[in-house]
Image: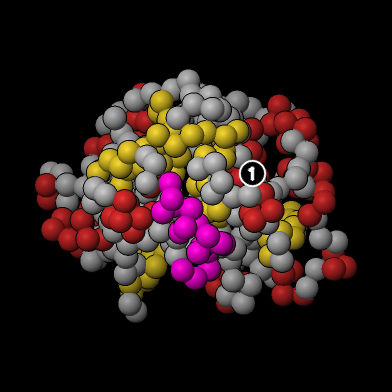
Amino acid sequence: MSEAGILSNPRSSPLVHSQYFDGEAVLALGDELHLLNPVAALVWQCCDGESSSTEIADDLAEVFGAAPGTLQSDVEKAIGEFKSAGLLVPDEDGAGASQRLSRLLTAYDLDCESCKEAQPRAFRTVLEFGGHLVVIGFDTEDACTAVEAAFSSYVLAPSDTPEPVDDARPAFSLTLATNTVDSRGIRPLHLLYRGGEVVVSGRNASRVLNALAAYLAFHGDLSSAGVVAIPGLVVAKAGTNPGEPVMLLQANTRLSGRERRLAKAGIMVADSPAIWLDPATHEVLVGAPGVSFDSSPLTSLAEGLPRLGADIAILSPGRYPVQAVSARGAHDPLSALLAFAPPSEGWPLAESGLEALDALLDRVEIIEGNDIRG
């Protein structure tokens, strides 16, 4: 099937609700349910409207350690089935769909019936951040022990844990590979899940563990840290260090399945659920603001796990001045403000974030477009 026949750059429909469980996915469109196997679930996650079927196939081949082109027919078949089922946005509607705000990053609803029915991880801990109870699941006891040691001041004792939390699906889960090849002969990855969705994957466990701290920061006390959260992604050219300029991209940019191209383009990224912006200095903070933790248990854990290859370069923790912002349809401060604006409900410090963003946009270059592939 030609790429033209399956949509040039397939984009998932905003009307589709997705849930991920142990690598598989369930897609709901109205009263219809679609069960995806792990490969199809990865293809679905890559349907962001910015990648062609060939690019998706090449990226997945890289993930699975397969030769380029070997997954092309499988990817085209999956995309064709998505299209036939009405799960994708038609090409002519893609631009409008791209303007929608990203899904809010919050912990799973503890009252969610489907979450309660999901199989829990073998090990789990509960952390308390700013009044939020954050359940973290693990496949191994070593990982659970290391995270509890790193975030010891936030660990909630079992006797203090409300009963509904015991049955809740973890808000975050860690799957850390212990072998360089799994039972199927596939090269695995270290994975950080938010709910059932992979938010960070890496060949080095330290990347995934450090990213966990940044994602936990979203539930912490950002006000005390002196930052606000802005939906989006921080990127920079290779070799960028704290104190050197970075660019901000709007929130619907996804890294999943595209890191190989980004690395080849000489782009660094920050693993974070949001942009941490200091309203006083207009700088971006990379790291886990407001979260006090001991990184040594995480470092020790990572050193005992296999390094599965090279990861895309990650920006080091620190402060960075903002040189430019980039978003589709953004050509002036107002349109850029609309592209980056935090949701009015459920987002931490949304009003303060909007004010800080407004002030920043008067100081930086605004670039129309959102292509980070190089």
> In the image, residue 268 lies at what x, y percent?
45, 29
- Circle 1 crowding by C-alpha within 10 Å: few under 14, some 14–19, many from 20: many
Q: Is residue 113 above or below residue 43?
A: below
Q: Residue at x 37, y 46 (%)?
A: 362
Residue at which label 1 appears: 288
Of the pair 281 and 255, the residue shown nearer to us: 281
Residue 214 in which image quadrant:
top right
> In the image, residue 54 lies at what x, y percent?
24, 37
Tell me if residue 358 is in the magenta stretch.
Answer: yes
Question: Can residue 27 be spotted in the picture?
Answer: yes
Identify the magenta region: 344-360
Q: Residue at x 48, y 34 (%)?
A: 321
Q: Is residue 49 left or right of residue 181?
A: left
Q: Is residue 52 above or below residue 122?
A: above
Q: Main secondary structure of the magenta part?
A: helix
Q: Is residue 324 left or right of residue 111?
A: left
> In the image, residue 110 lies at what x, y percent?
63, 72
